[in-house]
Image (tube, rainbow, N blue to C red):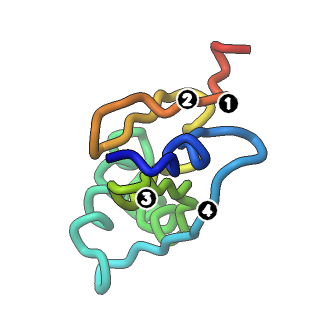
Amino acid sequence: MSTGSEDRFPLTVGEDTGDTIDVSLSPETTPGVYERRVACLMQSGLSEDEARRATATPLTLELFYGIGQGLFAVESEPLDSIRVYNPYDGTEVPNENLIYNR
């Protein structure tokens, strides 16, 4: 049963919408994600030392909350070039920032 909250609080990506949080990765607190990010950056051409230094820089995540569903987050940096999908129901989140929509 819908309460109408979904219509009043739609999920969107836009210049003036959204909440963000900075997340720090480390081998002690987030070892799996930390090592994956290091590996990803090394595949992009960074040395291991450069990748580890870059991984120490906090990531900014855009937060989304689907009413009746839950919280999810997406890295903020690529939001002007990627489509975002709600992981709970698979629907695309409207994205006003997409560079190919301009």
Query: What amino acid is found at the position of numbered circle 4 in the picture?
Result: Thr
Return the x and y of residue 9 as percentages of the image width and height: 58, 49
Considering only vertical position in the picture, is 20 above or below 42? Answer: below
Q: Which residue is mark 1?
A: 97
If you read the primary sequence from the N terminus, does the residue marked by circle 2 or circle 4 appear first? 4
Name the residue at 63% across, 60% down: 19
Separation of disc 1 and disc 3 at Cα? 28 Å
If you read the primary sequence from the N terminus, does the residue marked by circle 3 or circle 2 appear first? 3
Query: What amino acid is found at the position of numbered circle 1 in the picture?
Result: Asn
Asked whether 19 or 1 is in front, the reply is 1
Separation of disc 4 and disc 3 at Cα? 24 Å
Separation of disc 2 and disc 4 at Cα? 17 Å
Q: Do the numbered discs 3 and 2 sit on residues whose CB atoms are within 8 Å?
A: no
Q: Which residue is mark 2?
A: 94
Considering only vertical position in the picture, is 9 above or below 50? Answer: above
Name the residue at 48% across, 74% down: 24
**Are there few (<14), some (14-19), or many (20+) residues within 10 Å of tag 4?**
some
Asked whether 2 or 64 is in front, the reply is 2
Q: Which residue is mark 3?
A: 51
- Does residue 89 appear left or right of residue 99 in this picture? left
- Does residue 38 appear left or right of residue 55 in this picture? left
Q: Which residue is mark 4?
A: 20
Return the x and y of residue 98 as percentages of the image width and height: 63, 24
- Secondary structure, mark 2, is loop
Which quadrant of the structure image shows residue 48?
bottom left
Quarter of the image with the C terminus in it:
top right
Separation of disc 3 and disc 2 at Cα? 32 Å
If you read the primary sequence from the N terminus, does the residue marked by circle 4 or circle 3 appear first? 4
Query: What amino acid is found at the position of numbered circle 3 in the picture?
Result: Ala
